[in-house]
């Protein structure tokens, strides 16, 4: 079982990213649950999306100790990182996260937003870039299932740019 927490601020597309990740897991024939929460301020406030992926039944639908934390902002890292498993993976967006506690052992600092802007033309692709990186690092879902789930969810006319964003994220990290 893998527990994933995607965190950042409202408007960064993390809820959508969580839904896509869960749908990709289902596409791979696995079990998945997705939940979300965000502050009342929605855009700009803290938000998180959580996904549990398992080969067997999922008996409790909430993440209790993430195997992976995506932190798109410093506030999100500070707020949602406390219960990360000791061997857990942290992926930070270098544009917004500067101070990573030394207690996190497996940290990947990735210029997620910068890559979205430079390679895809707009920051709004950052969530899809992040999904590519998560898939490369964890193998939680297959790239093929992830791409299919992305294409099923994104607005018509943005498919090619979202495919590019996935590739960019996937290539931005190495295990």
Image (spheres, helix red, strand yellow):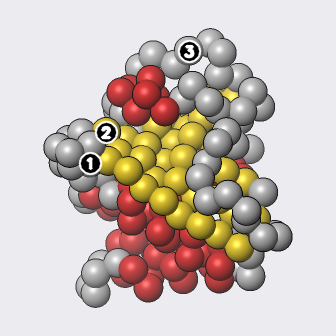
> How far across and down, in percent of the image, does residue 106 sit?
69, 29
Name the residue: 24% across, 39% down: 45
Please state which of residues 125 and 118 is positioned toward the viewer in this rendering.
Answer: 125
Residue that carries the numbered disc 3 in the rendered image:
101
- The tag earlier along the polypeptide, 2 or 1, is 1
Q: Are marks 2 and 1 in contact (CB under 8 Å)?
A: yes
Residue that carries the numbered disc 2 in the rendered image:
46
- Report the disc number at residue 132: none
Left or right, residue 59 beside residue 173 = right
Rounded to the nearest whole Å, what is the CA distance between mark 2 and mark 1? 6 Å
Q: State the SS at label 2.
A: strand
Residue 82 can be seen in this image: yes
Instruction: Work out which quarter of the rendered image holds the N terminus and state it.
Output: bottom right
> How far across and down, in percent of the image, does residue 146 sit?
58, 73
Give the residue furthest to the top: 102
- Report the disc number at residue 10: 1
Rounded to the nearest whole Å, what is the CA distance between mark 3 and mark 1? 23 Å
Name the residue: 46% across, 76% down: 150
Name the residue: 60% across, 75% down: 24
Note whether 115 is above or below 147 in the view shown. above
Rounded to the nearest whole Å, what is the CA distance between mark 3 and mark 2? 19 Å
Give the residue furthest to the front: 59
Note whether 83 is above or below 34 in the view shown. above
Labels 3, 1: front one: 1
């Amino acid at each position: 079982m893998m527990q994933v927490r995607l965190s950042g601020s409202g408007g960064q597309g993390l809820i959508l990213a969580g839904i896509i990740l869960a749908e990709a897991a289902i596409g791979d024939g696995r079990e998945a649950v997705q939940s979300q929460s965000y502050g009342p301020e929605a855009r700009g406030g803290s938000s998180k999306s959580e996904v549990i992926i398992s080969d067997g039944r999922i008996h409790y639908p909430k993440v209790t100790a993430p195997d992976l934390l995506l932190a798109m902002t410093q506030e999100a890292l500070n707020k949602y990182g406390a219960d990360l498993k000791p061997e857990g993976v942290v992926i930070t967006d270098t544009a917004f996260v500067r101070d990573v506690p030394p207690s996190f052992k497996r940290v990947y600092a990735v210029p997620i937003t910068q890559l979205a802007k430079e390679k895809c033309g707009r920051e709004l692709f950052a969530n899809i870039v992040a999904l590519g990186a998560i898939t490369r690092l964890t193998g939680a879902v297959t790239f093929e299932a992830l791409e299919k789930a992305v294409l099923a969810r994104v607005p018509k006319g943005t498919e090619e740019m979202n495919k590019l964003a996935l590739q960019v994220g996937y290539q931005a990290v190495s295990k």
